[in-house]
Amino acid sequence: MADLTSASASTAAASLSTEGKLDALRQELARRGVEGFLVPRGDEHQGEYVAPSAERLAWLTGFKGSAGFACVLQEEAAIFVDGRYTLQVRHEVPESVFAPRHVSDEPLADWLDGRLKPGQRLAYDPWLHTEEQVRRLEKTTTALGASLVALDGNPIDAVWGDRPAPPKAKIRPHDLALAGRSSAEKREELGAQLAKAGIAAAVITLPDSIAWLLNVRGGDVAHSPLPLSFAVLHADGGVEWFVDPDKLTPEVTAGLGNAVAVETPERLADSLGRLGKAGAKVMVDPSTAARWTFERLRAAQAEVVAGADPCLLPKACKNAAELDGMRRAHRRDGAALSRFLHWLNAEAEPRAGTDPVSELEAAERLAAFRGATGELRDLSFDTIAGAGPNGAIVHYRVSEETNRPLGDGELFLCDSGGQYRDGTTDVTRTMAIGRPSAEMCRRFTLVLKGHIALARARFPKGTTGSQLDALARYALWQEGLDYDHGTGHGVGSYLNVHEGPQRISKLPNTVALQPGMIVSNEPGYYKTGGYGIRIENLVAVTESPKREGEERDMLAFETLTLAPIDRRLVELDLLNREEAEWLDAYHARVRAEIAPQLDAAARVWLEAATAPLGS
């Protein structure tokens, strides 16, 4: 390809193929004197959902998953994903251009060994990598005799000719009745904790933390009501909020009060510089904040204290108002999902002379049922509607190119959720289309046994999600089966559908489950080329009353999600008495809370779908 200047490359790359975009990027890297570049799927806030202007990995490679990264060298390039995306990445990314790699089986360090030569320079954008990530990268490059170089300005932006403008969605108040606590109360409490630790300020870079702290919601990214912005929380409870002032509605401005100062995002560097000049102790989260933040504070000679974002834990532990809102949202959402399942039962069964329901049609109809509630603000993520082999792609996203009919004798996996002002939902149901095979029923029941084991769990205070994870996998393990994703993630209150710091996973986690936390319960099984199974409910961590003779304070789970589990796929002989009783009790609760919201035909269907096992 002929040599291009940066400006002309930007124009030319707007309509290039994946290979052409990679060529343009390599020429830009050569112009900057570096031999390689890392392209994460993320933005300056390290969030799961990013604005179109920050979709650099998707623009370069075609990969549309929510996690992954690419490494571009002058002679080779690879894209790294986890177990959720190993099938998807091969559908979306040309392997002749980017070699797909499982990030656990062949991590970046192994791939670079022998490819990144001593003395070469691997570059990165310091806004798009956390402090912890950069430290690991520095160890990797040093071990290879190479160096890691921070670039001023992202080279992809230099060649992305039709890059969208940054978002400017309006920011609105989140009502106190839904938030449960005022912003002033939250800020003063967290500020007092900083003061007690001798810390002058904390830099907050996660938009969901800022939304929670200030009781506001935005719309800068799809599916999460986030205001993209930064904040500095001071020990006196005051906040500097670095946000585009054009986004603020009069209601937000009026409700902020004198203790919140609004500044443009460009002023963040100046604020961090002032903290350094004052010799202040400043806390920043190395796992969520960009390396740029740390470098700016160090350059200003601030005393940087590595610590978790102070909003994470209190945001995760929902108060009574937030839990009540989540229950309302799940009752509303459960009715919408039940209407959809009733429709699907009638429309998807194979019938002569009728066109089969497609994945796209199913996803659109489910969204319409949620929208008909009049309360839906957005989907909480793109609906995963996978028929047959598409269901085995854990984070499958249906498109016109991949759209598939729901075929007779197949399974249909539907993972979906809604954003409502009073709560966020996330639910997966796997349905039989026609007559399922004996293998499908057996493996569905193994997944169900794991789901029930976790739902019924009682555990001592101080227990982490990683200590509970095996409960959901045990039945599968006994038959040599497993799944490659976590069992549970935290969920926000009209915020991110994936929220930390808690999780239920094989991966070690030191954050104990606490009352008020909401997590998903979603074991699964995936047969490549065949079908996928997942059963997901959201559960809230609750205090469990102490029983006679017990010595420890115990916790348990309250199931929030209300929707039928497909009884046609349950192999009764595999369930023990306690498991069967749990499913019957759950279905009785679904009938009691959902049936009154349905019309007569849907109620009749729900009665049958939730009838006691064996009836």
Image (cartoon, rainbow, N blue to C red):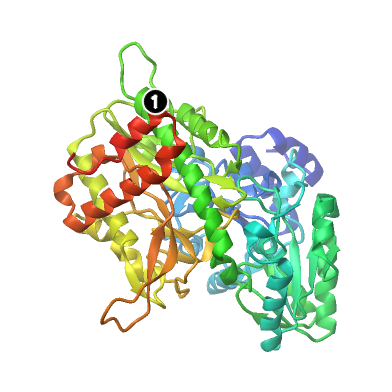
Q: At 56% across and 66% down in the image, what residue appears?
A: 319
Front-most of residues 366 and 159: 366
Q: At 82% across and 50% down in the image, what residue appears?
A: 249
Front-most of residues 352 and 481: 352
Q: Position of residue 155 (x, y in %)?
A: 72, 52
Look at the image and tell me whether residue 15 can be seen. yes
Q: Position of residue 22 (x, y in %)?
A: 62, 44
Q: Is residue 339 left or right of residue 277?
A: left
Q: Position of residue 593 (x, y in %)?
A: 41, 45
Q: Which residue is identified by label 1?
A: 405
**Residue 467: quarter of image:** bottom left
**Residue 202: quarter of image:** bottom right
The C terminus lies in which quarter of the figure?
A: top left
Look at the image and tell me whether residue 35 can be seen. no
Q: At 28% across and 35% down in the image, what residue appears?
A: 608
Residue occupying the far left of the picture:
573
Q: Position of residue 551 (x, y in %)?
A: 31, 84
> 10 Å neighbourhood of mark 1: few (<14), some, or many (≥20)?
some
The N terminus lies in which quarter of the figure?
A: top right
Residue occupying the far top of the picture:
353
